[in-house]
Amino acid sequence: MKPVTEEQEMIVLIEGEGDTKEKALDAAFMTLRHKVGGTLLRIEPMSVEVIQAQKREYTERFLFLFFPRIRTKYYLQLKVCVKVVSFCMENIDFKVSKSNFKTINEGEKICY
């Protein structure tokens, strides 16, 4: 029988943006699963390298004139080396079994 799990290492570039540093980091790691893809069992970060980190401040005003306040946005771009353990559906041998049940096609009437 073939092994049903596969382990590999890969380097993924992820990015995230948020109102706080923590939200930017969370947003970046939430995209990691989608970038890796497949049927994942485990994602283990081996190393993380910061490519770009930005803090952007801007003034927000109500009706372009009143109540000015300073807003902050954080942006992170990371290069992450991950070890991925995934489930290989191709290596599973499914047994075919047939049933004696009759399927009802559209338009057929059932009489008891």
Image (cartoon, rainbow, N blue to C red):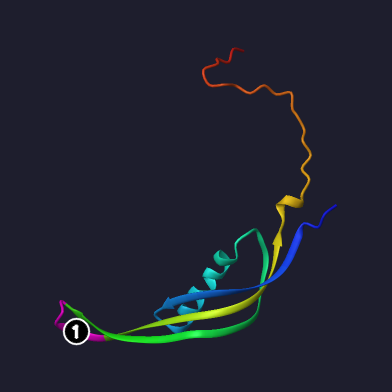
Quickly name the residue at label 1.
67
Q: Is residue 6 left or right of residue 53?
A: right
* Residue 66 part of the magenta-drawn span: yes
Q: Is residue 31 above or below residue 48?
A: above
Q: In this view, does 72 lie above or below 2?
A: below
Q: In which quarter of the image is the C terminus?
A: top right
Residue 2 x/y as whole percent:
82, 54
Boundaries of the magenta span: 63-69
Name the residue at 60% across, 66% down.
Answer: 36
* Residue 102 picture quarter: top right
Residue 47 x/y as whole percent:
64, 82
Q: Is residue 53 left or right of residue 100?
A: left
Residue 64 x/y as whole percent:
15, 79
Name the residue at 45% across, 84% down.
Answer: 21
* Residue 5 picture quarter: bottom right
Q: How crowded is mark 1: few (under 14 residues within 10 Å), some or many (20 or more)?
A: few
Name the residue nearer the viewer: 109 or 50.
50
